[in-house]
Image (tube, coloured by chain):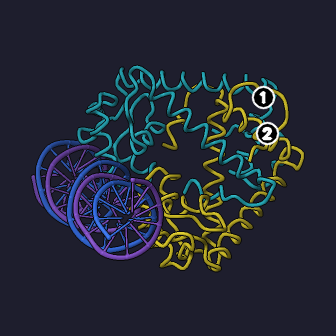
Chain colours: A cyan, B yellow, C purple, D blue
Amino acid sequence: MTDWHEIETSKREATLQVLFKVARLLNEKAVARVQDRPGGQSFRAAHTALFPHIPPEGIRLTQLAGRLGITKQAVFQLVRDLEGMGVLERLQDPSDGRAKLIAFSSTGRTAIASGLSTLRELEQDMAAGIGQESWQQLRMTLLRLHDHLLDPLKPCQGGHQTSE
Amino acid sequence: MTDWHEIETSKREATLQVLFKVARLLNEKAVARVQDRPGGQSFRAAHTALFPHIPPEGIRLTQLAGRLGITKQAVFQLVRDLEGMGVLERLQDPSDGRAKLIAFSSTGRTAIASGLSTLRELEQDMAAGIGQESWQQLRMTLLRLHDHLLDPLKPCQGGHQTSE
DNA sequence: CAAGATAGTCAAGCATTCTTGACAAGTCAA
DNA sequence: TTGACTTGTCAAGAATGCTTGACTATCTTG
C-alpha cells in the first residue's frame, strides 16, 4: 500500500499526496545510494526491518518477534540469513542457557554506519537544495506533525515532545 | 524497504528519518480510515499500485505494464481480479481489434472518490492539528523539495515548477 | 525431582506477486 | 496474401515472507 494516494486528481495536489511522493522519491534515492556503496549488501525489506529493533547489547529472538508482530520462526529465518551474510551474530545469553542474544557483528556495525552516513550525505544535499532555513523549518514542522500523530489531543502549537 | 532508515542513532533525529516516519504513520492512518469505510473494498498493495496509472479514457494492458515496469501477464492477473471486484472494466479499443481499454467502472470511480475524500478529511485533521499556516508552509517546502528531487540542478529558491 | 513453561530450531505449507513460455486473434508491411 | 509482429490470454512455476506444528534443550516451580 504505497501508491494509491497518488491518483491524479484536481489541479491542486493535496499536501498529503506531495508528502507521500516526496517520501517515496527520497526513499528510492536513499536505497539507490546505499546500494551503490562498495560493500553495499543487498538486503531485502524483511531483513532491514529487523535493524531498528536490534540494540547494541543484543536482543532475544522471541523479544524481537514480539516487537515485530510476527512469529519467532519467521524471525529465526531472517536472522539465519543475516548471520550467513555476516551482518548479525548470535551469542549465548549468559543469564539463560536456552536463549541467545542477537546482535550486530563488527562488519554489520560498519555496514550500518556506512548506510547512516550515506543518509546524512543525502540529507545535506537536500538541505542545500532547498536552503538550510527551509530544511530546519521543515524538520520542526514534521516533528510537530509526528507528535500530533502519536497523540492527537492537546499539543497544538508547542515544541516537540521528546518522550522516551 | 520501509524501516531501515529508522535505526536509533544519535540524540538528534535526522530530518530524513522524521520525514520517513511521519509518512509511514500517515500512510497507516490513511489506509485504516479508508478501509473503515462502509463500502471499503479490501484491495491489496499490488492492486492499488495500478490506480494512479489508469486515466479516465482507459489504457491498454501493455502500456500499463510498461509504466509499472512489470510484465503484461502480471498486470493481466491484477486487472482480472479488479474486474471481478467490479472496480475496473475492459472495453474494446475501437482503434485496434486486438486491444482493450482498461478503465474504472462507475462503482470504481465512486470508490476512488470516496477514498480521496477520506484522504482530504485526514488532511484537514492534520492541518488543524499543527495549524493552517504551518500546513501551508509545509506544503510549499515539500513542493520545492519535490522539484529539487526531480531536477537537482538550478531551481534553488523559486516557486513550484508545474510541468505537466 | 517431576511437571510444566519457555527459547530456539527444523520442516512443511500457504498466500502473494511476480516470472517465463506458449498461443490465438488481430494488424500491418512487403 | 503471406509473414512478421503486437495484443491479450492461459498455464505453470519461482521467490518472498510469512504461517502452523512438532521437537529438543533449558529453566522454573511445587
Circle 1 residues within 10 Å: few <14, some 14–19, many ≥20: some
Say what secondary structure mark 2 lies in: loop
Q: Marks 2 and 1: in contact by CB < 8 Å?
A: yes
Name the residue at 39% across, 32% down: A58
Chain bearing mark 2 = B
Q: Quadrant of residue D13?
A: bottom left
Residue A27, how many percent across, how many down?
57, 38
Identify the chain of the residue marked 1, using the numbered disc in the image. Answer: B
**For the point 33% across and 31% down, which residue is it?**
A88
Q: Are marks 1 and 2 on the same chain?
A: yes
Please give the residue where the numbered disc 2 appears in the rendered image. Answer: B161
Residue B97, placed above or below residue A139: below
In three-dimensional space, the C-alpha distance between marks 1 and 2, rounded to whole angstroms, equals 9 Å
| Residue A128 rendering spot, x and y as whole percentages | 73, 22
Q: Nearer the viewer, residue A136 or B101?
A: B101
User: Which label was assigned to residue B155?
Assistant: 1
D11 relative to B136, above or below = below
Would you say C27 lies left or right of B158 here? Answer: left
Query: Which residue does the image show at 59% across and 71% down from the upper left?
Result: B103
Q: Which mark is residue A159?
A: none
| Nearest to the observer: residue A49 or residue B39 | B39
- The amino acid at mark 1 is Pro
Give the vertical position of A20 relative to B105 (above or below): above
Residue B19 lies, in percent from the top left, at 66, 39
In the structure shown, which secondary structural element does the residue marked by tag 1 occupy?
loop
Q: From this viewpoint, which residue is outermost toward the right?
A: B133
